[in-house]
Structures are given as structure tokens and as C-alpha cells.
Image (cartoon, rainbow, N blue to C red):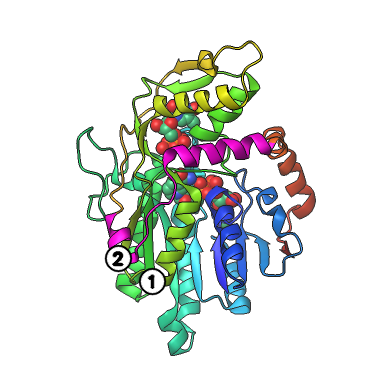
């Protein structure tokens, strides 16, 4: 089996669903269920014995050691993190606790387990660390896209904490020999995306008649990757990625934030027109810019293509269409997230206890 951390979050839950759709290999899902972890993302796995869910912290060394000894995973995919830049600006404590200290403790627990494995299993073991292109900092408008050689220049508390975790992972290979692989991907989008991030926030606010808040001039560029393309890339890296290597994963879809918001408005104008017949664009408002806002990210995913034969399957147009269709088809999921109903459910289901359930 494999151990996935953070598998109730946006990318993690897509990965868990994809994994169990593509193979019968069981999966242990360790997730703290912070505000970003939503068990409803995994509701379709109810009763599926291949999925074992444990509520817990990657920084809980005793828990992780026990889970590793009991379940004996052959690989770990580490998604668990605090992931939202704006939250890291308001307060970075949780980012340091999970992304830095949590990753350190996880690495230590995994190292002890890995050393105890018989030789063949030790050689085949993998620790796949999921990171971000934001560790590379901000690109000038005409600069070439980030390659794996690009210097680390993190600018936000979030990206600094992820950069720190990447360095720890690297050090655990070089010093301790732990067989790690790191991926740095661009902005993901798709189903189960928490509506604090740009694309789901704009879809949800548009439908609710709320303002569409564009930070600053809206000319910042991100390179959008459909989440299922990312999951396929991670499966490839786990299967064939070389130990100690870094792989950049991107969507070949650079867009300004304003282009994104306009595309969402146009799609919704066609699929779910406003009652007054006006375009959703009338809801766009420009608000104060994010402090330290990175201007441009772009990924050169050439190594993924050359070495592992991976390319994204979705264009931005097809991916955005699927994403908007998913949000239109899942108003209950959106309502649950917005009302905090899932937080109440988490409190009722788990209380303060750590819980282990087949979902
Ligand atoms: P998310 O915020 O949606 O989910 C994070 C998950 O981790 C949640 O389920 C949360 O409960 C869990 N978690 C948080 N702290 C934990 C802890 N201490 N122990 C166990 N679980 C914990 O994040 P996401 O968007 O799914 O991102 C997943 C990973 O991918 C992160 O490492 C993030 O840095 C990276 N990443 C994300 C993007 C993106 O566009 N979303 C882009 C590049 C990289
Ligand atoms: P976000 O989804 O938070 O991802 P990241 O900051 O990790 O790239 O934001 C994507 C871009 O959208 C970023 O340039 C900030 C901008 N943005 C807005 O303009 N308005 C918003 O309400 C949000 C959440 C983001």
C-alpha cells in the first residue's frame, strides 16, 4: 500500500480518487482535517476497504511511527501542508508548524521505518514530496519559464515554508540516503478546490451575486494545471521518477488573473446567465493588491516530457469547462463548505479523537 498525507485536501483528494480508480493498491490517508481538509471530497469511497482514513498530524511522530509499522507502505506521497498565500500573510505560525516542523518530523519517522525494511523493500521505497513553483520566486514578463535548475527565491511566508521543506527533503537524501523525489508544480484547478483560491472563489462568488475581487491590476500571471493532469504526473513520478531528482509539472497555460476572471464570466454567461441579462463582468472589482505579490510564475515541464513521457491532456479551455461544470453540478458541496457544515460534521465525527475508518 501507499501512504498519502493531506489526502482530504484539494489535490490530495483528487489524487486518492484517481489512485483508487486506476489501481487496487490500498491507500492509507493521513490528514489532520484542518479547515482545508474536507471528508466530503472522499464521500464516494464510503465502504471501500482499499481506503483507510486516519485523522492525524504529520508532525505527530508517535502516530506516524505506529501507522508505518502497522501498514508498511511501499511509498509516501506528501501533500499535507498549509497552502494559501493570503493566510500565510495574515499569520504564518501554522505554515511553519506543518510545512517545516511537520515535514521534518515526518521525514524522521519515515527514515526510521525505511531503515528497518528488508533490503529489497528499502531499495524500492520512495518518499514523494509535493511542492510548488512558488519556491522559485517571481519571473520577469519575458524571462524563460522555471526549470528544475532555477534558483530558490521564495517571497511569501507560504513559499518560504515550502522552500524550507524542499531543502529538508533534499538533505534527508544527501545525508541519510532516504530515497526521495520532489515535484514542483504550478497552480492547480479543478473539482474540490476550496473557494478561497482564485478560480473557485470567482465561480462561487459570481453565482452568489457577490463581487469578484481582483488584486491590484490583475496582470499577474499564473500557469494553470488541471488537477487530474497533475495526479497523472505524480503517478508517473512515483512509478519511474529517479531518486534525488526534482520534476517541474506545469500546464503550459499562462494566463493573467484578469484573463481567468473574464473567461469564467463568459462561460457562466453562456451556461447560467444572470437574471438581469448582464454579464457577470459587472461584478468584477479591483481591490488592494496582495503584499509582496509575485508577478509571474511559469513552468518548463520539458523534463517530465523527456524523461517520463508525461504531458498535460487538458487545454485551459477544456479544463476550465470541466471545472465550471463540476461547480454547477455540486451546489451542495459548495454550500457545505461555505456554511461550515463540514466543520460541524468533522467535530461530531472525530471530536478530539484520532479516528481510523475505512471510508
Ligand atoms: P489544501 O490546503 O487544499 O489541502 C491540504 C491538506 O493537508 C488538507 O486536507 C489539510 O487538512 C491537510 N493538512 C494540513 N496540515 C496537516 C498536518 N499537519 N498533518 C496532516 N494533514 C495536514 O492544499 P492543496 O491545494 O491540495 O495542496 C496540496 C499540496 O500541493 C501542498 O503541499 C501544496 O503546497 C502543494 N501545491 C499546491 C498547489 C495548488 O495550486 N493548490 C500548487 C503547487 C503546490
Ligand atoms: P491563489 O489562487 O491564491 O494562488 P497563488 O497565490 O498561490 O498563486 O491566487 C492566484 C492569483 O489570483 C494570485 O495572483 C492572486 C490572485 N487573486 C486575486 O486577484 N483575487 C483573489 O480573490 C484571490 C484569492 C487571488
Looking at the image, which is closer to me, 267 or 260? 267
Looking at the rendered structure, the secondary structure element under dot 1 is helix
Dot 1 surroundings within 10 Å: few (below 14), some, or many (20 or more)? few
Looking at the image, which is closer to me, 79 or 176? 79
Does residue 308 show up magenta in the picture?
Answer: yes
Q: Who's the residue at 43% across and 89% down the image? A: 119
Looking at the image, which is closer to me, 58 or 83? 83
Q: Up-down: is 184 above or below 154?
A: below
Residue range highlighted in magenta: 302-330
Does residue 117 show up magenta in the picture?
Answer: no
**Residue located beneath label 2 in the image:** 307
**Residue located beneath label 1 in the image:** 240
Label 2–label 1 contact, CB within 8 A:
yes
Direction front: furthest residue: 270
Q: Who's the residue at 39% across and 56% down the image? A: 165
Looking at the image, which is closer to me, 96 or 146? 146
Residue 96 visible somewhere in the drawing: no
Q: Tell me where residue 341 appears, x and y as whole percent.
A: 74, 39
- Residue 204, by quadrant, is top right
Q: Up-down: is 122 above or below 219?
A: below
Direction right: furthest residue: 348
Looking at the rendered structure, the secondary structure element under dot 2 is helix
- In which quadrant is the C terminus drawn? bottom right
Q: Main secondary structure of the magenta part?
A: helix
**Which sits earlier in the primary sequence, circle 2 or circle 1?**
1
- Residue 294, by quadrant, is top left
Residue 94 visible somewhere in the drawing: yes
- In which quadrant is the N terminus drawn? bottom right
Q: Who's the residue at 46% across and 56% down the image? A: 101
Q: Up-down: is 350 above or below 273?
A: below
Amino acid at each position: 500500500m501507499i501512504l498519502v498525507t493531506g489526502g482530504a485536501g484539494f489535490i490530495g483528494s483528487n489524487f486518492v480518487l484517481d489512485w483508487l480508480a486506476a489501481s487496487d493498491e490500498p491507500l492509507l490517508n493521513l490528514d489532520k482535517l484542518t479547515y482545508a481538509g474536507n471528508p466530503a471530497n472522499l464521500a464516494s469511497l464510503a465502504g471501500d476497504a482499499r481506503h483507510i482514513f486516519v485523522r492525524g498530524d504529520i508532525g505527530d511522530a508517535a502516530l506516524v511511527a505506529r501507522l508505518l509499522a502497522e501498514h508498511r507502505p511501499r511509498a509516501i506521497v506528501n501533500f499535507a501542508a498549509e497552502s494559501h498565500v493570503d493566510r500565510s500573510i495574515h499569520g504564518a505560525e501554522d505554515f511553519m508548524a506543518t510545512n517545516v516542523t511537520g515535514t521534518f518530523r515526518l521525514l524522521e519517522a519515515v527514515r526510521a521505518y525505511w531503515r528497518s525494511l528488508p533490503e529489497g523493500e528499502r531499495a524500492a521505497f520512495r518518499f514523494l514530496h509535493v511542492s510548488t513553483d512558488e519556491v522559485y520566486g517571481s519571473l520577469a514578463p519575458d524571462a524563460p519559464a522555471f526549470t528544475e535548475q532555477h534558483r530558490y527565491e521564495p517571497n511569501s511566508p507560504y513559499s518560504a515554508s515550502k522552500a524550507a521543506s524542499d531543502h529538508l527533503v533534499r538533505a534527508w537524501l544527501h545525508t541519510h540516503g532516504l530515497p526521495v523525489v520532489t515535484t514542483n508544480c504550478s497552480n492547480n484547478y479543478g473539482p474540490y478546490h476550496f473557494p478561497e483560491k482564485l478560480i473557485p472563489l470567482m465561480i462561487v462568488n459570481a453565482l452568489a451575486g457577490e463581487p469578484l475581487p481582483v488584486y491590484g491590476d490583475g496582470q499577474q500571471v499564473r500557469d494553470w494545471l488541471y488537477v487530474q493532469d497533475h495526479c497523472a504526473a505524480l503517478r508517473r513520478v512515483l512509478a519511474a521518477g529517479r531518486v534525488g531528482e526534482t520534476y517541474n509539472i506545469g500546464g503550459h497555460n499562462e494566463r493573467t488573473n484578469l484573463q481567468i476572471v473574464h473567461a469564467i464570466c463568459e462561460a457562466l454567461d453562456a451556461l447560467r446567465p444572470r437574471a438581469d441579462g448582464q454579464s457577470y463582468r459587472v461584478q468584477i472589482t479591483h481591490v488592494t493588491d496582495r503584499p509582496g505579490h509575485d508577478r509571474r510564475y511559469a513552468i518548463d515541464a520539458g523534463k517530465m516530457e523527456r524523461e517520463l513521457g508525461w504531458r498535460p491532456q487538458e487545454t485551459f479551455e477544456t479544463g476550465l469547462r470541466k471545472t465550471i461544470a463540476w461547480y454547477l453540478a455540486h451546489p451542495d458541496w459548495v454550500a457545505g463548505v461555505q456554511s461550515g457544515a463540514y466543520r460541524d460534521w468533522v467535530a461530531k465525527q472525530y471530536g478530539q479523537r484520532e479516528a481510523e475508518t475505512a471510508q
